[in-house]
Image: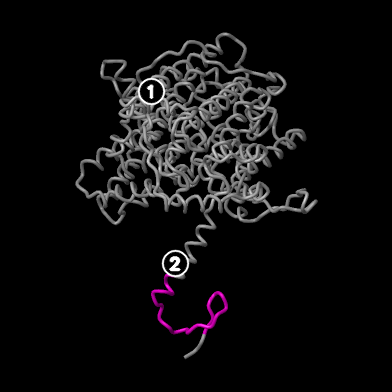
Amino acid sequence: MTLGRDSNGRDVDAFALEGPDTKREEETDTSTEGEERNKLAYCVTDVPPWYLCIILGIQHCLTAFGGIIAIPLILSGGLCLQYDGLTQSHLISTIFFVSGICTLLQVTFGVRLPILQGGTFTLLVPSLAMLSTPEWTCPAWTQNASLVNTSSPEFIEVWQSRMRALQGSIMVGSLFQVFVGFSGLIGFFMRFIGPLTIAPTISLIGLSLFDSAGTKAGHQWGISGMTTVLIILFSQYLRHIPVPFPTFSKEKRLHTTRVYIFQILPVLLGITLPWLICYILTICDVFPTEPNQYGHLARTDVKGDVVSRAPWITFPYPGQWGLPTVSLAGVVGILAGVISSMIESVGDYHACARLSGAPPPPKHAINRGIGIEGLGCLLAGAWGTGNGTTSYSENVGALGITKVGSRMVIIAGAVLLVAIGVFGKVAAIFTTIPSPVIGGMFLVMFGVIAAAGVSNLQYVDMNSSRNIFIFGFSMFCGLVIPNWMFKNTTAIATGVIALDQVLTVLLTTSMFVGGFLGFILDNTIPGSKLERGIVAWNKAHKEDSSNTLESGDVYDLPFGITSYLSSSSWLRYVPFCPPGEPDSLDGADTDALESKQRRGHQRPSQVLVAVA
């Protein structure tokens, strides 16, 4: 027989069968390697050094940057603000400010996991559908830059009336989310909602925005193409390539540290370089100066002196655009987006718990999280962002990159978001991003959203003709029906104006059409839970890896509120209140977990490198 060598250099019989002891040793080695690879530098309840909190908080802000600023820039078209850069900067300041406030509420009193809150595309689609109805269609003169006087009372009333209607609809719709969360009904709804409902709903969010992406990218395809190529290059091809950065420490003095900068900031780098190139080409007058010529919107001075006119300090406040009004059609459309946002957030909570070393979130924590998100949408509507708030999946993924699951990092990021919202000049700078650069970013971003929805089908048996029919039919109708409705806006005439508006908004909202059909068909056509993907989907959301903390340490309310509430026995029946006696682990498990926690801690200098 020939002899070989194992991974440790020992001679082994190349043809020997593996015995039980050999298998056990290999399993132990594998589990140890996996544990070392997945260990956390800081768990959810740990407090890293202040400078590390600031650095990682900045990274979380930059990770959410693309999604946060994209929403007001898209919404500005429906609000007739495409030529009013100063008001766009106010909207950006407001959404940053409210995102920071909602994040603080969520981390402190909500689900209490390190999860960032920000604007949501699930409310953007029904908002645009509402603003496209005949009642709220922008006047023709607002589409001509030469006819728009941004300081005239007539123009101000045009966009503020639309914003107030949007605010009222979001505020009323968010009350439903508050009720579902704090009443504990989210668990009841999740029994009937599976991957075949989620997949078309999320996918159609991205697919329905193709017109917005194509319009902005088409203003200068060279610039938008360069933006898309750079984002793809940084996020896909160069993400595993480290870049040396000079670093100073007492031990090593001046030395270089390798940071995976392309993996951390692909979107920011991908739009900054084309933005700078557009600025240089604008100075050199390469792009045409006539508004009607191709390529004019690639100039960085299209919106005039918006940066110089923007105030240094601005304080967004509730009702800053006037008293909100309520539209029944808008409320019904927003409800479709709110339901989608709730379902997505429940999945984010479980993913965040796994990546931050926390136990799976208990029911009371999930109920509080959904309720606080509803409260966040209510605040966003009151402040006038034109949108709501939801948990950001991108930032949940960042926890897995940095191996820092501390919620103090997210609190630092939330404070930074509030600060950005207060400094008006910062938001004004973002409005100078040329339209083709934004279009190039949208090509990537909306494509990823569409693919994220399709990824839910991994839990479903796609060899089943039943499931193929449900998904295909839901997706196709979600594209066809809204497209026909946009071309025939007066087709629905029941004689009741309010009912006409409700049906028009719902049937022009692609995510509602696809999600509703998927929900009805999935729950009425016979099929087992295994075939429908319900079993695998629930298992993926509930399984946890390497818990390091007891549930009460993570999810109980702060400032001694839990201890105070536990004195009243009847409060244990309140869906969002923690139980009086938190579940504890047995002694052996606790010792093992404490040992795991001690091994997980790293020095702050190591964590700075782990940001990549």
Residue 50 in magenta stretch: no
Is label 1 in a helix, a strand or a loop? helix
Quarter occupied by residue 507? top left
Q: Is residue 74 visible?
A: yes
Find residue 416 and report its horizontal and vertical position in percent.
62, 30
User: Which residue is located at x 25 percent, y 49 percent?
Assistant: 529
Which numbered circle lies on residue 27? 2
Nearest to viewer (mark 1 / mark 2): 2
Mark 2 packing: few (<14 Cα in 10 Å), some, or many (20+)?
few
- In this orientation, which residue lies closer to the viewer: 578 or 491? 578
Task: Please name the residue that numbered disc 1 is placed on.
Answer: 173
Q: Which residues are magenta?
A: 4-24
- Mark 1 / mark 2, whichever is N-terminal: 2
User: Which kind of residue does numbered mark 2 sit on?
Assistant: Glu
Which numbered circle lies on residue 26? none
Find residue 521 and report its horizontal and vertical position in percent.
25, 41
> Residue furthest toward the front?
587
Vertical comparison of 556 with 168: above or below: below
Mark 1 packing: few (<14 Cα in 10 Å), some, or many (20+)?
many
